[in-house]
Amino acid sequence: MQINDLKKSKVLVIGDLMLDQYINGIVDRVSPEAPVPIIKPSKEEVRLGGAANVAANIASIGGKVSLLGIVGKDEFGLKFRQTLKKYSIKAKLVTSSNPTITKQRIVVSQQQLLRLDRESFFSKKDSSGLKKICASEMKKHDLVILSDYGKGSLQDVKSIIRMAKKEKCRVIVDPKGKDFMKYKGASIMTPNYLEFCEVVGTPANESDLTKKAFSLVKSLGLEVLLITRGADGITLIRSEKKELIRNDFSAESKEVFDVSGAGDTVIATLAAALSIGKDILEATKLANIAAGIVVGKFGTSTIKLQDILSALSAGKGSKILTNSEAILKIKKAQEKNEKVVFTNGCFDILHLGHITYLQKAKELGSKLIVAVNSDSSVKILKGSKRPINKLSDRMLVLASLECVDWVISFTESSPEKIIRKLKPNILVKGNDYKVDEIAGSKFVLSNGGSIKTIPLVKGISTSLTISKILKSKPFK
């Protein structure tokens, strides 16, 4: 994925708008009037919250975003409008007689001591006013986010979803409350784990979670259900060829400082990636990385394109596992009913044939693990002049591919031994092999797995590539 393409994203955001105010100060004594600290304010900061934070995240990665919502006539409404200008967010706002939803936080040494919430449920008149301006904006977009915080902006969310479908506008919903049926007709829903449990009940185990999630997807007619699970990462349920598939993404955060607005970052990054044509797996991976970054910041924060680029660069090596690490990861994945696909090879000079083959292999299951021949075993198989690239380089290049989840190495000329240890669900090779010729095939079949062969791209191989290079004239 070309991450810079996120700058081409174009998204419409509709929902409950908030202003987050942080009053930072210092404490040097306790009040003589009551056992409370006396705080001397030293700095005040305002940030966009709620649906506005979603829009701010899209704007921060360079995407184009339009925002629709409701604010009050008060001083906080004025501050909200001023803050929008900092992000170059185009907004159409309904002005209400109710106060602007504002959360004021008193902070000392990055520790929140107190929060004051100024809000009241918006009237039906306010909500209807917002709905009226939705139709014209939806005509300009292919994708809309409905960010519902239960404050009254989206009281007639069913009509807004119908409106979006009429305009062939894909809808992503960040839901609120116990009634998810009102969001029926949306394409994607992104509840957090607690919100999910409130609707379907707390799952007894991972298998039960899968059943409950599948049932919810069917009842709502969703394309995708994305459940954010804090330290447990993201669980993705998607419909593909009339079959429901579960994928899990481990939490990317090294240190959790503040989870405020993490869900906003997830849905913003997801939408931005989808709006430029990325598939749901690519989009979710980016959203997971973005969430891992933002929870390491204080308060309601936004993600920047460079943050994602840096995290992606740093994370390539984390796919490279020892055999013992791979055994544990595969076991955990299979406990979640994920199908693990195994393939192996030298992958000396990566070419189109390799990429196509690996992409098709990944499509067969939830996780793809690639076992790479060691340098010594490549020499035995390919001759003394091979490999061209050393093992560590070959593994890192494979780990850089979106379709590859894990990379390991093996020293034997045959992968039979490592296949027996890993116990994959699906064993894959090119269709130049017959099933009974594939190393490990008998074991995988006896263990309840399956064998798949994939057509190879004709006229492309590492040996042919090397031959062409050798025959070509040297550069001057």
Image (cartoon, helix red, strand yellow):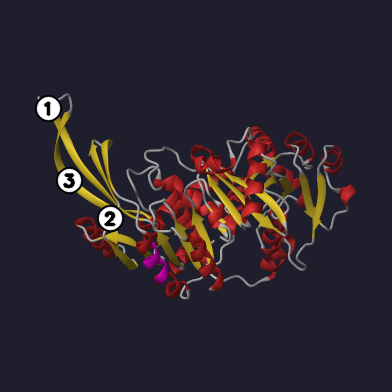
Does the image show residue 476?
A: no
Determine which residue is flagged by label 3: 43
Q: Which residues are magenta?
A: 127-132
- Residue depicted at 47% across the width and 52% down the height: 266
The quarter holding residue 162 reads bottom right
In-image side of 12 versus 274 (left or right): left
Q: Is residue 61 magenta?
A: no
- Residue furthest to the front: 124
Please state the horizontal and vertical placement of residue 233, each as a whole percent of the image: 53, 42
Determine which residue is flagged by label 1: 31
What amino acid type should be assigned to the residue bearing mark 3? Lys
- Quarter of the image for the N terminus: give it: bottom right
- Quarter of the image for the C terminus: give it: bottom right
What amino acid type should be assigned to the residue bearing mark 2? Thr
Q: CA distance from mark 2 to mark 3?
A: 22 Å
Mark closer to the chain start, 1 or 3: 1
SS label for mark 1: loop
What amino acid type should be assigned to the residue bearing mark 1? Ser
Determine which residue is flagged by label 2: 100
